[in-house]
Amino acid sequence: MLTKKKREWIVLADRAHAEIYTRHYVNGALQQHLLLEHPAARLHQKDQGTDRPGRGNRPVGKQHHSYSDHADFPTAESTAFLKEVSREIDQAARNGELDCIILIALPKTLAMIKSEFSSQTSTKIVGEYAKNLVQFPAHELPQRIEKLRESA
């Protein structure tokens, strides 16, 4: 039974994928609104033209050490991607396209997404769940989301 009309956005994300589903009733069906992918966030540094840090010798003794690597390209790419996802959600909230948001992602991903939200958008968050559901098919999502809500 459908009850109480509400425009709900359910955001599933990992560091390289974001799926946004909408639901217009509390018990309504999920409809995919937006699918975003950023394949560069999944690449390893060697795939992006860099290799593992080199090794060196200390001037005194026979100890070896690796040079530190100051650039973590997958993390930088993923951060840029998640900020773009966040801006997309924030813009929709400002335009009045949604009433509430449910975020489902691992903790670091949740933090990155929420970091770009305006205070207006942040008040629309009605649920946050530290789980990665991106890999699950759409027909399984309503049951999994319901389980998350019950366990919270």
Image (cartoon, grey):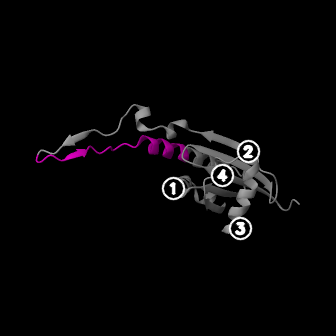
Q: Amino acid type of disc 3? A: Glu
Q: Amino acid at mark 4?
A: Val
Q: Which residue is mark 1?
A: 108
Q: Amino acid at mark 1?
A: Lys
Residue at numbered disc 4: 11
Spatial CA span between label 1 and label 3: 23 Å
**Callout 3 secondary element:** helix
Discs 1/3, front? 3
In space, the residues marked 2 and 1 are separated at their CA atoms by 24 Å
Marks 1/4: CA distance? 15 Å
Q: Residues within 10 Å of mark 1 (few under 14, many from 20)?
A: few
Indicate the position of residue 2 as horizontal and vertical percent values. 87, 59
Q: Is tag 1's residue or tag 4's residue first in the polypeptide sequence?
A: 4
Query: Which mark sits nearer the N-terminus, 2 or 3?
Result: 2
Q: What residue is disc 2 on?
A: 32
Q: Secondary structure at mark 4?
A: strand
Where residue 93 sits in the image (x, y, percent)? 67, 52
Q: What span is colored magenta in the figure?
A: 60-83
| Residue located at (32% from left, 43% from top) | 69
Position in image of residue 106 (x %, y %) = 56, 56
The residue lying toward the viewer, choosing from 38 and 142, is 142
- The answer for how far apart the CA atoms under marks 4 and 2 are is 10 Å
Q: Residue furthest right?
A: 1
Q: Amino acid at mark 2?
A: Gln
The residue where tag 3 is placed is: 150
Report the front residue among 130 and 93.
130
Q: Quadrant of the C terminus?
A: bottom right
Task: Determine whether, in the image, residue 60 is placed left or right of residue 90.
Answer: left
